[in-house]
């Protein structure tokens, strides 16, 4: 099995509100795949469908060779998911949040968690309510990475992170991918896709377009959207 993600003709309808329409793409194992698009384009809906958090209307989703609906529990054990919003119980200390995330999976992740915390400069003694957005993001990264998953799915992971921590975050991803993992990076930051991703696709108003190359600049990105507006 060479595919980490296989999505075919995925549709999710929200009635009057935009959903996702006939989305199909595949991500090879060992890839860093950029999932580009503005807020509201359908990226998060696609990701939540992939993880079985949303019931799809039609189509099929396989993650690491498993069906996203029938085998959700097993998929979640092997995936490191970081949502766009880093929400935790505000009274909990960082170390307890990280340990809880490991306990949910029934794993001892202390060694890897300590390594990531050291790299990202995470203060595990503080309470969540004392943290800035960027520091909450770092806690979310640790929770997603500490169990060394086969597949990482990051939804807007770098907002709020300073440039040094962003660089260290991508260094960590490169290390995991070199060891056999796969990464899907959902973002609207083109420079991240250009620098770190090997393949990419653009979401726009619930539809997806594969790119021949992830190397796309701001001007080309805007031109793509203008052309799509004319065609739609």
Image (cartoon, rainbow, N blue to C red):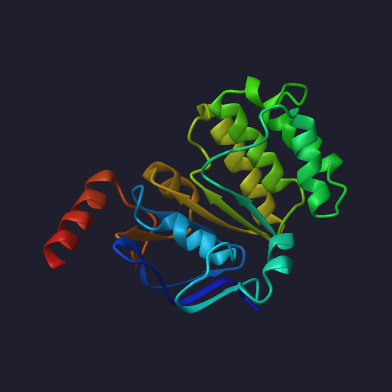
Residue 182's place in the image compared with 91, above or below, is below
Q: Position of residue 40 (x, y in %)?
A: 35, 51
Quarter of the image where the C terminus is located: bottom left
Q: Residue furthest left?
A: 230
Please state which of residues 198 and 182 is positioned toward the viewer in this rendering: 182
| Side (left or right) of 215 relative to 177 | left
Please state which of residues 26 and 40 is positioned toward the viewer in this rendering: 40
Mark yes or no: residue 115 visible: no
Mark yes or no: residue 89 visible: yes
Q: Position of residue 152 (x, y in %)?
A: 62, 55
Residue at 62% x, 23% y is 131
| Side (left or right) of 198 relative to 176 | left
Residue 66's place in the image compared with 179, above or below, is below
Q: Position of residue 118 (x, y in %)?
A: 75, 29
Query: Which quadrant of the structure image shows residue 205?
Result: bottom left
Residue at 45% x, 44% y is 192
Q: Residue furthest right?
A: 108
| Side (left or right) of 189 relative to 225 | right
Q: Residue furthest front?
A: 15
Quarter of the image where the N terminus is located: bottom right
Residue 166's place in the image compared with 223, above or below, is above
Q: Position of residue 30 (x, y in %)?
A: 61, 63
């Amino acid at each position: 099995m060479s595919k980490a993600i296989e999505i075919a003709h995925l549709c999710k309808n929200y009635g009057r509100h935009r959903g996702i329409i006939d989305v199909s793409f595949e991500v090879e194992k060992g890839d860093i795949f950029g999932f580009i698009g503005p807020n509201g384009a359908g990226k998060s809906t696609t990701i939540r469908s992939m993880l079985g958090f949303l019931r799809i209307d039609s189509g099929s989703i396989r993650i690491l060779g498993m069906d996203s609906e029938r085998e959700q529990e097993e998929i979640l054990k092997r995936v490191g998911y970081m949502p766009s919003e880093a929400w935790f119980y505000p009274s909990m200390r960082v170390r307890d949040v990280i340990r809880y995330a490991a306990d949910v999976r029934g794993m001892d992740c202390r060694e890897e968690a300590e390594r990531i915390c050291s790299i990202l400069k995470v203060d595990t003694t503080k309470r969540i309510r004392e943290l800035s957005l960027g520091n909450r993001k770092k806690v979310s990264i640790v929770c997603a990475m500490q169990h060394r998953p086969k597949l990482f799915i990051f939804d807007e992971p770098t907002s709020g992170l300073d440039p040094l921590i962003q660089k260290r975050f991508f260094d960590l991803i490169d290390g995991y991918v070199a060891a056999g993992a796969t990464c899907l990076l959902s973002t609207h930051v083109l420079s991240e896709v250009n620098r770190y991703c090997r393949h990419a696709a653009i979401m726009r108003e619930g539809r997806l377009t594969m790119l021949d190359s992830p190397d796309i600049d701001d001007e080309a990105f805007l031109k793509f959207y203008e052309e799509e507006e004319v065609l739609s």
